[in-house]
Amino acid sequence: MSFLPISLNLAGKQIGLIGGGQVAAQKLKSLVRYSSNIRVIAPEIQAEIEAIPAVQCLHEAYQPQHIEGLFLVFACTDSPEVNAQIQADCESRGILCNRTDDAEVSDFHSSALVETDDFVVAMNSKRKEVKKTVLMAQEIEHFVREREQLLQQKEQLAGKVFLVGFGPGNPNLLSRRGEQLLFQADIIFYDDLLDHEFLARYRGEKHYVGKRRGNHSKEQDEINEVLYQAASARKMVVRLKGGDPLIFGRGSEERFYLEEKGISVEIVPGISSAIAAASLGNIPLTHRGIASSVSFGTAHGKSSYKIPNSDTAVYYMGASNMHEIATNYLEQGYPNDYPVGLVYKASFPDQEVTRTTIGQLSRGEVAAKSPVIGIFGHTVNYRELLKAQE
Amino acid sequence: MFKNHLISIVGAGPGDPDLLTVKALRRIQEADVILYDALHGDEVLQLASTQAVKIYAGKHYQDGQHQTERQDKIHEQLKEYALQGLRVVRLKAGDPFIFGRGAEELEFCFREQLTVEVVPGITAGLAAASAFHIPVTLRGENSMALFYTGHKRNGGFSDIDTVASVLKSNGPVIVYMGLKNLQLLVTALLERGVDRHTPLQISSRVGHADQQNYSTSLEELDGFLRKNEPPMPAVILIGTHAKPVLPEK
């Protein structure tokens, strides 16, 4: 059995419903939105049906001549025999018939409909699971309405730049607002996100502005300029940034530049990579009785890694720097067994977590792989510490 | 086979449902049971199914319950519901691992061999920075940001020297603590030679419709707090560059 979902043009065509009870009344609820030329035939017809202006009522028992000239027929009587007769009569006249008591033998059946200002979504269950279909249609309705509303609001966002924190890379960790803005964007600027396929689902123009090795400040100027150009062309601009835009993300630089030129900027926070690495690597950054401070650090100038003496320290750096940081810790007098957690490719399916020590790292017994987040501090071994507390 | 349904320790962010991650939102919508703390607006909880059981697990002021007892009770509930095959979400304000006490619950789940995951959230300090245009890091100006909660220890504050040294190197310090002890902390910082003009922001109710930022400085905090009562919860940002930068009108 195969059913083709199509949309029928009902202009100038008449529809017949045989039956005047609850089933017919229910059918009519959706039919009257599409046709004002409906005939209902039954000896007794509910008052609710009689009250519908688009419906002509004929108070008679079913006769084959009732369906002459009709385009579609719904057989909704409570008698399977009568319904079967209606179907046979329709077939001999080339009229499409739906039997509400037997979907399998019908020529067509009605879809669950989701209707908004701009769209109609029709949904059919392949397994005839009505409840599931209704639930799914509600979900889809919610989704379609939300998206439609976002598109309607888009006008007001023209000429604005949104600096959106993308989080560590897995699109699941993007914020809901960030995701909605991507959907609305006319133009999307992104750098080294690791999941390029993800962006394909958005209709905006996509531009890669990732950093190449070389003159970073020149590149930053170029990025500032392309953002400005896009916004002044009245586009709705999304600038995606890894992690959080304000934690070593240069979000402030871009914002200052654009605002000075009169462009309105909004920053949407993201999950900073350090925080993601902690959660996804099961390494707390703070913990009552173990750590009350955590610092997030990066390289200052060329290569100086300040060891901040905070209880926990997280570094956003290349793998090669982890060795150097560990050595700095040792020079500052931290013991060999001071714990380090290395989280490689946080949030991706091939994420790896390594628990080691500054001693092992500095001696090269453990090598970090890029991209990596390094967490230095006792919370790395919090399980042992918690056990010791008990 | 897992013996329980997955327990998710979920960072709910600052309270604005738009700042939930896609993953957190999905976990909340699918949850059968949600154990939540205070500090969230109702908006996040409203995203859950109407059939979901929602249990308040936060701190009641002066409820007479000991912290350990309260925590044990949470653990019991996590286990009980998960073993019934229900999808349990432990919802935490901000991020579970930045002063969120997610570790105790995680450890409990590991010990009981319950399958568990941690879903990160937007921590209040970073949400405040975005909302109020406060730069956290600036290239060439600072290479470090410190997240700190002021516990009093041996009559002083834990890690106070670290806080002072980060501030002296222009790094921002994001403080998660009540306003009650803030003046004491600031006094301790001034005693350690931190510049008295250093800007200090109190970002109140970040992520809620009535969010507001209050700007003052280390030396002016005392006077400020005598005249103002920023609504809670609040997060505090201190640092040379930790002040709102707004476009000129």
Image: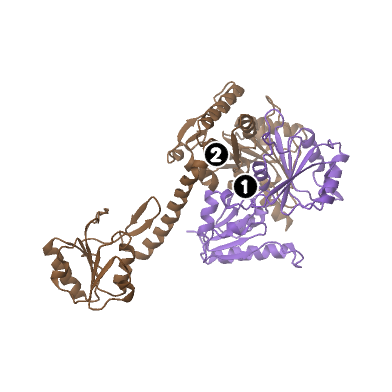
Chain colours: A brown, B purple
Three-letter code, disc 2: Lys
The image shows residue A110 at horizontal and vertical percentages of 29, 61
* Residue A150 circle label: none
Q: Quadrant of residue A267?
A: top right
Closer to the camera in the image, B209 or A312: B209
**Residue situated furthest left in the rendering:** A92
Residue A28 visible in the displayed image: yes
- Cα–Cα span, label 2 and label 1: 19 Å
**Residue situated furthest front in the rendering:** A53
* Residue B122 circle label: 1
Examine the rendered structure and indicate whether residue B148 appears above or below residue A389: above
- Looking at the rendered image, the disc whose residue lies closer to the viewer, 2 or 1, is 1
Closer to the camera in the image, B128 or A298: B128
Closer to the camera in the image, B50 or A225: A225
Q: Determine whether the residue tagged by mark 1 lies in a helix, strand or loop.
A: loop
The image shows residue A229 at horizontal and vertical percentages of 53, 28
Q: Quadrant of the N terminus of chain A?
A: bottom left
Q: Is residue B72 left or right of residue A372?
A: right
The image shows residue B117 at horizontal and vertical percentages of 56, 53
What residue is pinned by disc 2? A345
